[in-house]
Amino acid sequence: MPKTRKFADLFVRKEVNTDMFNKTGLDKTLTAFSLTTMGVGAIVGAGIFITPGIIAASYSGPGVWLSYLVAAVVCSLAALCYSEFSSTIPLAGSAYTYIYAVFGELIAWILGWALISEYLFAVSSVAVSWSAYFQNILAGFNIHLPEIFRAAYGTAGSPHALFDLPAFLITMIIAYLLVQGVRESARVNAVMVILKISVIILFIVVAAFYIRPANYSPMLPFGVKGVVRGAAVAFYAYIGFDAVSTASEEVKNPKRDMPIGIVSSLVVASVLYILLSVVLVGVVHYTKLNVSDPVAFALHFIHQDWVAGIVSLGAVVGMTTVLIVMLYGGTRLIFAISRDGLLPSALHKLNPKTHVPTINTWVLGFIASVFAGVIPLAKIAELVNIGTLFAFAMVSLGVVFLRKDRRFRDLPKSFEVPLYPFIPIVSFLACVYLMLQLASFTWMMFGIWLIIGLVVYFSYGYSHSHARQNEEN
């Protein structure tokens, strides 16, 4: 590390033209449809099978759909900002790369480090949920794992558990799938997304015949504040579209397809969440929905056990697509950070045959699988929302500076945020407001994670930064 360090050095900005016009080695195989299925695969996953019941019972009551609507509106504002960035700077790394170009290295590193936590803990938490649903299916065939391998040590209701073996194994299997190549992973994901949507529609159609209008009263038992607090929790369900923008360098026509993929996946997911929530609280009174599997619970409640079995299978398939997309997004984020010199170079080396960052994929997959195996779900999920909201807030604010930056005025772009600068500013403020609704423990954990990140940056990233080396030369 240099003996003297100018404060301005910490905010050196990435010259995106260098990477945009160089061959990166990543295969350009994805289309707008691939991106849409990736987004829906990531957004419509564990959240739709778990969070509607929790939000209804604890925050919003029968107005749970309003919480999803508020979260969807905030996400859609951020999605518009992501779309402008992705069509202007079609590079891997998502928000990290965008902020590096606009605000400089230190802020980009902080954001990138926060997003690493989002992907890492999102994969781990979904793997734990996947394990619980998978074990329920096995139990239906009277198959039971040894108790020590059913959950992590300290998991409520599992006093003798030591290690969540199914969660560990599914994460490693997903890592293996991703190592085979992005085209193969996208095909598997697309098939699973179609199956998952079919299962959700099946629930909506079957359960709609059992709606009792009396269950909708009172609509907002916890008031408007409950709806907003519920929206902060519901936000967890929508974080997946951020992973779409990490795929920019592997898209055939990123300037056209990226905005389509981001916006369309959010629209499809929002409609499914809202419809499912309306039906769910119409079938079962909201006070009974604070369970880990509210959709299956509702079907058992109306004695449609055969559909409940299909929904449980759909939940496993649904969570598998989330694992694919979120692990993929995390590997491409680390690829971009490593390519900039802020993490070791081995993490952006590509397999010459599959054009995939193999070492990076195995490292992230292994860490996520170990976390899933040894840390209870309640502890894993703490960092997911706050890291994502922080990224959304910075991207929203970044659009304002993107428009003002002369370096980007001449770059062709296929999408611009409407009602500029009103929408980017409102999006920024909405994300900050939702961040402030999160628990103090979450903020404390977020602070500890960022301190660790700063230690990594100043002990390695600062002295290896390619942007700083280019500027010095």
Image: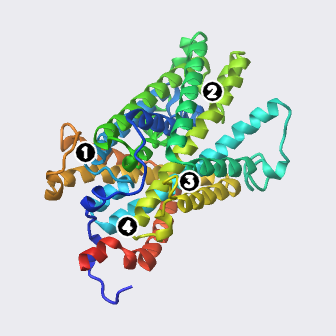
Q: Is residue 446 above or below residue 269?
A: below
User: Residue at the spot x=71%, y=40% of the render?
Assistant: 132
Which picture quadrant has residue 338? bottom left
Q: Amino acid at mark 1?
A: Pro
Tell me the crowding category of disc 1: few under 14, some 14 to 19, or many 20 or more residues within 10 angstroms, Cα based: many
- Distance, label 4 to label 3, CA atoms, is 24 Å
Seen at 70% across and 54% down, the residue is 373
The mark found on residue 340 in the picture is 4
Circle number at residue 295: 2
Query: Among all residues in the image, which is located at the extreme bottom?
Result: 3
Q: Of the two numbered discs 2 and 4 on the same chain, state the one appearing first in sequence.
A: 2
Q: Which residue is mark 1?
A: 424
Name the residue beneath numbered marker 3: 121
Which of discs 2 and 3 lies nearer the camera? The answer is 3
The percent position of residue 179, horizontal first and vertical second, equals 57, 52
Q: Cα distance, mark 4 to mark 1? A: 27 Å
Please identify, in this view, whether the residue under mark 2 or under mark 4 is nearer the observer.
4
Task: Measure how far apart labels 2 and 3 are at the Cα level.
Answer: 24 Å
